[in-house]
Image (cartoon, grey):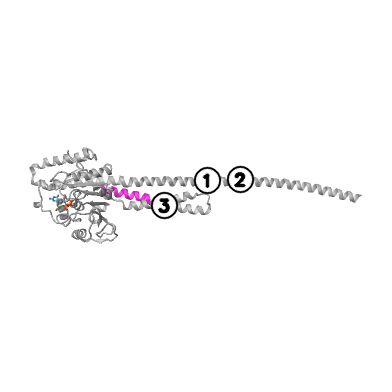
Amino acid sequence: APRTPLTDEQISSPLQVFGQAKKQINNIFVDIQDYVADASERMIDVNKICPDVIVDNELKSILDYRSKVKGICEVLTRDHMKVAFFGRTSNGKSTVVNAMLGEKVLPSGIGHTTNCFLQVEGSQTGDAYLVTEGSNEKQNVESVTHLAHALNYEKQLNEKELVHVYWPKDKCSLLRDDVALVDSPGVDVTPHLDDWIDAHCIDADVFVLVANAESTLMVTEKNFFHKVSTKLSKPNIFILNNRWDASANEPEFLDQVRKQHMERATDFLVKELKVCTPEEAVSRIFFISAKEVLQARVKERSGQALNSGALAEGFSARYMEFEEFEHRFEECISKSAIKTKFLNHSQQGKHLVKEMYKIMETIYNRSQELTQTKMCQKKEFQEKLNFTEQQLICITNQMKMKIHQMVDDVEDKVSKALND
Ligand code: GDP
C-alpha cells in the first residue's frame, strides 16, 4: 500500500507535545500543591481558635491529600516515554538504538552481545555514566569501549538485570525530549520471557521488534510478543526489517522479498496479535538499514562528507524510510505516553480536587450554621435582656408608686398623729 507523505506540520517533532503536556500538568499540580498547603495551614489555625468548626477527620484527610499531591508531583518529574527493543541476538537492536541516538552509545557487533537490559536516558548533569541495579554508584563512562568493558568484565551481570546508561541530553534530541530507550538481550537466549516482561516491559509505551530482513520472523520472536499482548492490552509494536541493505545485492528479488515480509509481518500484527488494522500496519512495518543510518549520522556529526561510492544501492530510500519510521514512532510514543501516564495523574488530580472541595464546602456550611446558631442565641439573649429590662422598669415603677403610697400613708399618719 502507498505511504502518505508527511506534511510540514507533522515534521516538527511530536515528542514535544509530551514535553508540553508534562509542563502543563506539572503546573496544575504545583497549583494544587500550593492550595492544599494553604488550606491545611488555615485549617490548623482555625482549629486552634474554634475547635468545633473542623472535625478531626477533615483535617487528617487534607493532610493526607498534601502528601498524595507531593507524591504525584515527584512521579511527574520522573515520567518519561519508554521504548523497548527486542529481537534475536545480532539482528541489530543496539545498532538501531545507536542510529536513533545519532552516535555509538551502546556497544554492538562481533565480540559484544548485550547480556542484560540497558536503558539509555538523558543525564541531568551533562556527564555520561552508568548505574547498575541496586546501586547508587555513578560509574563514569568515557566511551563506548569503556561502556562495553564495564558491562562485560567489571561485574557479572544477570540477563534480567537493568543497567541505566545516562547520556548527555544535549547530544541527542530524543533524550532531550524525555525518551528512554531500552535494549534487551536476544529473545533467543532466555527461557525467562515472562520475567522480562514483568520487570521491564509493563510500562513501555512502544515496542520495537528488530527483525532480520535476511530471514523470516522466528517463533521465539513471535512468542515474545504473544506474551506481551497477553499482559498489555493492545501494545504499540513496530517491526523493523533490518539489514535491508543486503537486498541491494539481489535487486531482482527485492520487490518480491519485501512483499513477502510485509505480508507476514502484517498478518502477525493484524491477525495473530490483533494489535492494529491492516491500514495501520503500513505505518508500523519498515525496511531499514540501521548500520547505514548510524554510519551516515556519525559522519555528519564529525563534519565528514558521506562517501557515496561506499554506499550500497538504494541508500537514500532506506535512509528516508528510517526517518519515516522515526517520525511514526515519535507520534505513537508521544500519544501513548500522554494517555497512559498523564490520564491517570489527571484523574487522580480531579478526584483530589473534588474531595477537597467537598470537605471545604462541609466546613463552610458548618461554620455558617454555627454563626447562625450564635446569632439566634444572641437574639434570644437580647430579647431576654429587653424583657428583663421591661420587667425591671415595671417593678421599679410599681415600687415607686408603692413607695409614694407608703410615703403618703406615713405622711397622712404622721399629720393625723400630730393633729391628735
Ligand atoms: P544486537 O545483538 O541485536 O544488538 O545486534 P548489534 O546491533 O550488535 O548488531 C550485530 C551486527 O550486525 C553488528 O556487527 C552490526 O554492525 C551489524 N548490523 C546491524 N545493523 C545492520 C544493518 O542494517 N546492515 C548490516 N549489513 N549490518 C548490520
Q: Is residue 20 magenta?
A: yes
Q: Which residue: 73% across, 46% down?
A: 395
Q: Residue 271: within the magenta? A: no
Asked if residue 8 shows in the view, the reply is no
Tally of marks: 3
Where is residue 408? Give x, y as percent. Answer: 83, 48
Q: Residues within 10 Å of mark 3 (few under 14, many from 20)?
A: many
User: CA separation, marks 3 and 2?
Assistant: 41 Å
Instruction: Kindly indicate whether the residue at mark 2 contacts the one at mark 3 (C-beta within 8 angstroms).
Output: no
Q: Which residues are magenta?
A: 14-31
Of badges 3 and 1, nearer the viewer stands: 3
Residue drawn at point x = 34 percent, y = 52 percent: 75
Read off the residue under disc 2. 379
Quarter occupied by residue 394: top right
Horizontal and vertical percent for residue 238?
Answer: 21, 44
Q: Earlier in the sequence, mark 1 or mark 2?
A: 1
Q: Quadrant of the image for the N terminus?
A: top left
Mark 2 nearby-residue class (10 Å; few <14, some 14–19, many ≥20): few
- Which sits in the foreground, 183 or 272? 272
Q: Identify residue for label 3.
A: 66
SS class, disc 2: helix
Q: CA distance from mark 1 to mark 2?
A: 16 Å
Whether the residues at callouts 1 and 2 have beta carbons within 8 Å, the answer is: no
Give the side of residue 82 with respect to residue 380, left or right. Answer: left
| Residue type at tag 1 | Gln
Give the labeled residue for mark 1.
368
Q: Percent position (x, y) of residue 232?
A: 28, 44
For the residue pair 291 and 313, the one nearer the viewer reads as 291
